[in-house]
Image: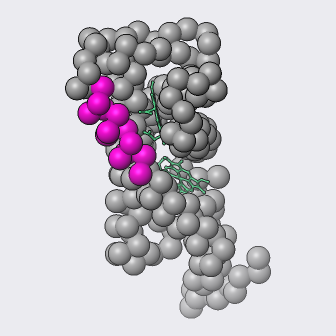
Amino acid sequence: MHGLIAIDIAGEPMSTVAETASDTPSPRYRPSQRILHWLMAIVIISALVIGLYCSYLEQGTALRRALLDVHKSLGMTALVLIAIRLPLRLSFGEPANRQAFGTLVHYAARCTHILLYVLMILMPLAGYATSAAGGHDLPWFGLFQWPDILPLDGPLEQAAARIHEYGAYCLYAILSLHVVAALWHHFFRRDDVLERIL
Ligand code: HEM
Ligand code: HEM
């Protein structure tokens, strides 16, 4: 990009705002954070879609059982990945914002990210508690069973299932907002918010 170059009174080239804005590489999340973001996006969106589909299937059918096994395996994978991702996020933080966003946009993004982290921890834990307290299988893609550390407990199973269900409603809403915001930044504002995570 041919930015305008001004010469200051000492004869040194002086970058204009236009040149600085386009030539400085955009600050991005660390590679490990970017990989984990997209890996978890695939795992969580697949778990959401399969979980939603299962909720329309009749209890006890072979198809529902098979799909729930895949669902639980994806959910437990998300639990392992979030245990790696959270410490990375806490130690690396996020890259500096290149564009100065308004306070409202800044805090809306921040709140959305925090809520997504809360749900990424709560959903697998509530799912685990539902299955473990109900004495159900805890498979991982047919390779092994996760340890069941909870005693059989009907009320706990019911409460965890309720949390899992309402957590899913929250996740649909917040995730939709998150994806729409990313597309809005990319296609309408044409800034580099999406590039930060690519
Ligand atoms: C990110 C992780 C997860 C997401 C996004 C997720 C999402 C969902 C959704 C949308 C449903 C259908 C709504 C409902 O009936 O509650 C569901 C159901 C279910 N999930 Fe998950 N889930 C996750 C993790 C897990 C894990 C780790 C387990 C167990 C190890 C699990 C076990 C179940 C079970 C047993 C149901 C059926 C509940 C019922 O019909 O009462 N989920 N999940
Ligand atoms: C097609 C799906 C998705 C798109 C297009 C997308 C897009 C983005 C973008 C552009 C950012 C950078 C925002 C910024 O730096 O201000 C971001 C960050 C983030 N996204 Fe997503 N995302 C998607 C799926 C998901 C899913 C499924 C989750 C979790 C449930 C998620 C959780 C997060 C979180 C927590 C951040 C903050 C960065 C971090 O701490 O890792 N995203 N996403």
Residue at screen point 62% across, 78% down: 188
Residue at screen point 54% across, 33% down: 58
In front: 111, or 196?
111
Chief secondary structure of the magenta span?
Answer: helix
Magenta stretch in the rendered image: 157-169
Residue 77 visible from this viewpoint: no
In front: 60, or 15?
60
Residue 106 percent location from the top left of the image: 39, 69
Query: Viewed as shown, does residue 117 lie left or right of 172?
Result: left
Q: Is residue 165 magenta?
A: yes
Residue at screen point 43% across, 46% down: 168
In front: 125, or 106?
125
Q: How many marks?
A: 0
Q: Is residue 81 magenta?
A: no
Q: Which residue reaches farthest bottom? A: 9
Quarter that holds the N terminus = bottom right
Residue 39 percent location from the top left of the image: 61, 38
Residue 67 percent location from the top left of the image: 61, 28
